[in-house]
Image (tube, helix red, strand yellow):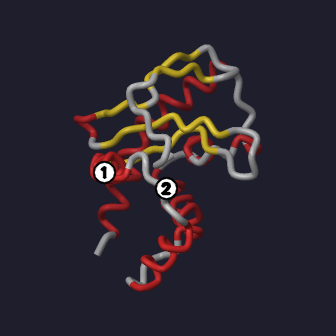
Protein backbone atom coordinates (compact mmCIF):
# COMPACT_ATOMS: atom_id res chain seq x y z
CA UNK A 1 0.00 0.00 0.00
CA UNK A 2 2.85 2.39 0.82
CA UNK A 3 4.62 1.76 -2.47
CA UNK A 4 1.50 2.03 -4.67
CA UNK A 5 -0.37 4.77 -2.75
CA UNK A 6 -2.59 6.60 -5.26
CA UNK A 7 -5.26 8.60 -3.40
CA UNK A 8 -6.78 10.42 -6.38
CA UNK A 9 -7.59 7.30 -8.40
CA UNK A 10 -11.23 6.34 -8.93
CA UNK A 11 -11.83 2.60 -8.63
CA UNK A 12 -14.68 0.19 -9.16
CA UNK A 13 -15.04 -2.40 -6.43
CA UNK A 14 -15.29 -5.79 -8.20
CA UNK A 15 -18.48 -7.77 -7.64
CA UNK A 16 -20.24 -4.76 -6.16
CA UNK A 17 -21.79 -1.99 -8.19
CA UNK A 18 -19.70 0.65 -6.42
CA UNK A 19 -17.41 3.26 -7.91
CA UNK A 20 -15.43 5.35 -5.43
CA UNK A 21 -12.30 7.36 -4.99
CA UNK A 22 -9.55 5.15 -3.66
CA UNK A 23 -9.12 7.50 -0.67
CA UNK A 24 -12.20 8.82 1.12
CA UNK A 25 -11.59 11.09 4.11
CA UNK A 26 -14.04 11.99 6.83
CA UNK A 27 -12.21 15.11 8.00
CA UNK A 28 -14.79 16.02 10.64
CA UNK A 29 -14.47 12.56 12.15
CA UNK A 30 -10.67 12.32 11.98
CA UNK A 31 -10.16 9.31 9.72
CA UNK A 32 -10.04 8.03 6.15
CA UNK A 33 -10.54 4.78 4.31
CA UNK A 34 -8.40 3.64 1.42
CA UNK A 35 -9.40 0.97 -1.08
CA UNK A 36 -6.54 -1.54 -1.20
CA UNK A 37 -8.38 -4.21 -3.19
CA UNK A 38 -6.26 -7.27 -2.40
CA UNK A 39 -8.44 -10.33 -2.87
CA UNK A 40 -7.80 -14.01 -3.26
CA UNK A 41 -4.67 -14.06 -1.14
CA UNK A 42 -4.10 -15.67 2.24
CA UNK A 43 -4.49 -12.23 3.84
CA UNK A 44 -6.99 -10.24 1.76
CA UNK A 45 -7.35 -6.54 2.38
CA UNK A 46 -10.26 -4.72 0.82
CA UNK A 47 -10.21 -1.43 2.78
CA UNK A 48 -7.63 0.15 5.06
CA UNK A 49 -9.04 2.50 7.68
CA UNK A 50 -6.59 5.03 9.07
CA UNK A 51 -6.44 8.11 11.23
CA UNK A 52 -5.55 11.48 9.71
CA UNK A 53 -2.21 11.26 11.54
CA UNK A 54 -1.47 7.92 9.89
CA UNK A 55 -2.51 9.38 6.53
CA UNK A 56 0.13 12.10 6.91
CA UNK A 57 2.80 9.44 7.58
CA UNK A 58 1.60 7.46 4.59
CA UNK A 59 1.86 10.52 2.34
CA UNK A 60 5.40 11.13 3.62
CA UNK A 61 6.56 7.62 2.74
CA UNK A 62 4.36 7.00 -0.33
CA UNK A 63 6.22 5.45 -3.24
CA UNK A 64 8.97 3.96 -1.10
CA UNK A 65 9.60 0.30 -0.38
CA UNK A 66 9.26 -0.60 3.28
CA UNK A 67 11.21 -3.74 4.10
CA UNK A 68 9.97 -6.22 6.67
CA UNK A 69 13.28 -6.67 8.51
CA UNK A 70 14.05 -2.95 9.07
CA UNK A 71 10.51 -2.47 10.36
CA UNK A 72 10.85 -5.40 12.77
CA UNK A 73 14.18 -4.04 14.05
CA UNK A 74 12.65 -0.57 14.55
CA UNK A 75 9.78 -2.08 16.52
CA UNK A 76 11.90 -4.36 18.69
CA UNK A 77 14.41 -1.61 19.58
CA UNK A 78 11.57 0.49 20.93
CA UNK A 79 9.77 -2.39 22.66
CA UNK A 80 6.68 -1.86 20.51
CA UNK A 81 4.08 -4.46 19.58
CA UNK A 82 5.23 -6.48 16.56
CA UNK A 83 3.22 -5.74 13.41
CA UNK A 84 2.13 -9.39 13.12
CA UNK A 85 0.14 -9.00 16.36
CA UNK A 86 -1.62 -5.76 15.42
CA UNK A 87 -4.51 -7.48 13.64
CA UNK A 88 -5.27 -9.59 16.72
CA UNK A 89 -5.13 -6.62 19.05
CA UNK A 90 -7.27 -4.55 16.69
CA UNK A 91 -9.84 -7.36 16.56
CA UNK A 92 -10.14 -7.49 20.34
CA UNK A 93 -10.59 -3.74 20.55
CA UNK A 94 -13.03 -3.57 17.63
CA UNK A 95 -15.45 -6.15 19.02
CA UNK A 96 -15.75 -4.05 22.18
CA UNK A 97 -17.24 -1.11 20.28
CA UNK A 98 -18.88 -2.55 17.16
CA UNK A 99 -20.82 -5.60 15.99
CA UNK A 100 -18.61 -8.57 15.04
CA UNK A 101 -19.95 -8.51 11.48
CA UNK A 102 -18.70 -4.93 11.02
CA UNK A 103 -15.33 -5.81 12.58
CA UNK A 104 -15.04 -8.78 10.18
CA UNK A 105 -15.78 -6.45 7.27
CA UNK A 106 -13.14 -3.91 8.36
CA UNK A 107 -10.57 -6.69 8.71
CA UNK A 108 -11.57 -8.21 5.34
CA UNK A 109 -12.51 -11.53 6.94
CA UNK A 110 -14.81 -12.29 4.03
CA UNK A 111 -14.58 -16.05 4.55
CA UNK A 112 -16.49 -15.51 7.79
CA UNK A 113 -19.09 -13.25 6.12
CA UNK A 114 -21.76 -13.88 3.55
CA UNK A 115 -21.95 -10.52 1.80
CA UNK A 116 -24.45 -9.66 -0.93
CA UNK A 117 -24.03 -6.51 -3.00
CA UNK A 118 -26.61 -4.60 -0.92
CA UNK A 119 -25.17 -5.85 2.36
CA UNK A 120 -21.65 -4.87 1.25
CA UNK A 121 -22.72 -1.23 0.89
CA UNK A 122 -24.52 -1.39 4.25
CA UNK A 123 -21.42 -2.80 5.93
CA UNK A 124 -19.25 -0.13 4.34
CA UNK A 125 -21.43 2.66 5.75
CA UNK A 126 -21.69 0.90 9.14
CA UNK A 127 -17.90 0.53 9.24
CA UNK A 128 -17.56 4.24 8.48
CA UNK A 129 -19.86 4.94 11.42
CA UNK A 130 -18.22 2.61 13.93
CA UNK A 131 -14.57 3.24 13.08
CA UNK A 132 -14.49 6.49 15.03
CA UNK A 133 -15.52 4.60 18.19
CA UNK A 134 -12.65 2.16 17.64
CA UNK A 135 -10.22 5.01 16.99
CA UNK A 136 -11.35 6.77 20.19
CA UNK A 137 -10.81 3.60 22.19
CA UNK A 138 -7.37 3.14 20.65
CA UNK A 139 -6.41 6.71 21.57
CA UNK A 140 -7.54 6.16 25.18
CA UNK A 141 -5.16 3.20 25.45
CA UNK A 142 -2.10 5.08 24.15
CA UNK A 143 0.46 5.91 26.75
Locate residue 11, reporting x and y percent. 53, 22
Choose between 93 and 19: the one closer to the eye. 19
Q: Which mark is residue 60?
A: 1
Q: Residue at x 44, y 24 (%)?
A: 9
The relative height of residue 83 versus residue 45 in the rendered view (above or below) is below
- N-terminal-most mark, 1 or 2: 1
Disc 2 secondary structure class:
loop
Farthest residue, direction front: 64
Residue 90 is situated, as x and y percent measured from the top left of the image, at 51, 60
Label 1, label 2: how many angstroms apart (C-alpha)?
Answer: 12 Å
In the image, taking residue 105 as reference, residue 21 lies left or right, namely left
Residue placed at 66% from the left, 22% from the top?
14
Measuring 42% from the left and 77% from the top, which residue is drawn there? 74
Mark in the foreground, 1 or 2: 2
Residue toward you, 90 or 71: 71
Q: Is residue 104 left or right of residue 82?
A: right
Horizontal and vertical percent for residue 100?
60, 48
Would you say 32 lies left or right of 13 here?
A: left
Other-residue count near label 1 (Cα within 10 Å), few / some / many at <14 / 14–19 / ≥20: few
- In the rendered image, the quadrant that contains the C terminus is bottom left
Which image quadrant is residue 121 in? top right
- Residue at 39% over, 47% down: 62
Q: Residue 87 occupies which quadrant of the picture?
A: bottom right
According to the image, label 2 marks what residue?
Answer: 65
Amino acid sequence: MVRSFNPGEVVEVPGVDLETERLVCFEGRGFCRYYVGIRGSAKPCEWAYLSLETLELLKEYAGTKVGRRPLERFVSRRSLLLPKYMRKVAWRLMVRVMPREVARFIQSRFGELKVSEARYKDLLSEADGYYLKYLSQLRELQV
